[in-house]
Image (cartoon, grey):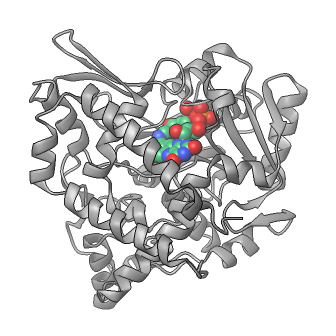
Amino acid sequence: MCAKSLDKLKKIQKSHLCNRCGTCVGLSKCKIVFADKTGKYRPVVACEIDEELADTLLEACAGKDFSFPKYTELFYKDTEKFHTYIGPYTQISIGHSTDTEIRSKGASGGIISAVLIYLLESGKIDGVITLGMSKKEPWLTQAMIATSREEIIEAAQSKYIISSVNEILAVSSEFKGRLAYVGLPGQVQSIRKLQAMNHPSVANIEYIFGPFYGNTLHFSSIKSFLKTYKEKDYTQIEKLYFRHGEWPGNMRIELKSGRIIELKKFHANYLIPFHILKNSLYCSDLANEFTDISGGDAWAPVYEERGKGFSMIIGRSVKGQHIIDEMVKKGLLVANPISEDEAIEMHSHGYDLKKRGTFIRIKIRKFFGKSVPDYGYKVEGFTFGRVLMELIISTMFVFLGTSLARWFIERFSPEFVGNIFEKTRTRWKKSTHNIKRNKLN
Ligand SMILES: Cc1cc2nc3c(=O)[nH]c(=O)nc-3n(C[C@H](O)[C@H](O)[C@H](O)COP(=O)(O)OP(=O)(O)OC[C@H]3O[C@@H](n4cnc5c(N)ncnc54)[C@H](O)[C@@H]3O)c2cc1C
């Protein structure tokens, strides 16, 4: 056994560097397991691992390091445009699927699902690695291989609890046929590392897609949400949605008793500071920079007022952009190009969080002697005001993540807290407008 690699891996697994992507679980064929998915959701080494495997798992782990410049160079040689915040790209557009079912079932414009269905139905792929809800434990997510339009639509929408898509590598590597893959930035980065290593587990992955990524939450968010509605047993959940109904949608829980609990997505955001996975705060990739196509919400009043669902679509690789162009030509997709500046303005809040906040938080973490991720680049030169703002936010996250703060907030109705949260957030966004946009471009 290679004590060195295995020890390093175990340290990462126990720290905030672990993004729970699931690669170490999938590739170890269950020698590493997620012991407690409704708890801390940490990978744990369950039986002896040989030296070669430990080395591979450590190399494939994107939690400790992922060189953005190196992998941009490797995978996007033919992509002409690049911005530090956005990553490599060919075209940025605002749009949606023209299929009303896909659009309404998708998280925003149904772009990702539409692309997947198009690739499948045109014979360019044979299956899709995607994230659905578990049939056996419907309160948990589960990675799956979808091979039909129905399965892709069933797995649509964003899931805001920790999910480990790459666990599926144990199964997907045996799949006979070409696959598309959908994942969050940390998961995608690990897939890119495996591709660079020429690892057989990813040899059948032809396309990589993924949503933008602000943050994800511990399962405690679901337990806490239920508690506020006086429901204590999460195993009574029959269906769990995070973006149900018209865009931007509602968090919705259907219980075995027939009771339905629903809360506006913007109000359910109150759960974020209490249950955020701390690794989200050390991830510097908002726009899923290492995909072929990535998609986010088109957050702008002009689209939000219209409802129905609008996405920001980033065609990155040449083959990714080619799919978008083909689908637009065939009338399957609406994709109206926008400029780099417009794209940054639309997500300036998120870019501030990921491209500035993350690097300040990394510095703070390093100051306390903790291990930090190495992304092969740094964003530096922040104003005193911005650093101070980050110190306040980081302190707030530590305080609100305690059991006492969670217990306290559970005494109030989520509608009430959500409303206050939305108003405070809007006020905070306005009051920090200048700090955040200062030199953002
Ligand atoms: C955890 C999380 C955080 C996000 N944060 C932001 C944000 O800050 N700003 C923003 O603009 N957009 C964010 N998004 C993206 C946004 O919610 C939509 O997913 C995106 O706009 C694509 O919409 P769509 O209708 O094209 O996707 P859909 O057609 O609904 O397809 C979504 C695809 O993503 C897969 N998927 C869903 N959840 C996960 C997950 N947790 N892990 C891996 N795969 C998943 C689904 O299985 C499906 O294949 C986030 C998404 C997630 C999952």
Q: Which residue shows up at 73% across the image and 34% down it?
A: 119
At 52% from the left and 18% from the top, the residue drawn is: 246
Farthest right residue? 329
User: x, y percentage for residue 39?
Assistant: 18, 51
Q: Position of residue 108 (x, y in %)?
A: 59, 30
Question: Where on the picture, by quarter, is residue 64?
Answer: bottom left
Give the answer, above or below, for where 221 lies relative to 31: above
The image quarter in which residue 376 lies: bottom right
Q: Quadrant of the N terminus?
A: bottom left
Quadrant in which the C terminus is drawn: bottom right
Residue 90, by quadrant, is: bottom right
Viewer-side residue, 348 vs 236: 348
138 displayed left or right of 324: left
Compared to 399, does 123 lie above or below? Answer: above
Q: Position of residue 175 (x, y in %)?
A: 54, 45
Q: Residue at x 19, y 15 (%)?
A: 256
Give the mark count.
0
- The reply to whether residue 130 is in sight is no
Residue 198 in view (yes/no): yes
Where in the figure is residue 195, as x and y percent of width and height? 62, 66
Would residue 397 be found to the left or right of residue 27 on screen? Answer: left
Say whether residue 398 is left or right of residue 411. right
- Using the image as rendered, state which of residue 271 and residue 419 is in the foreground: 419
Front residue of this view, candidates 14 and 432: 432
**Residue at x 30% of width, y 51% of height:** 273
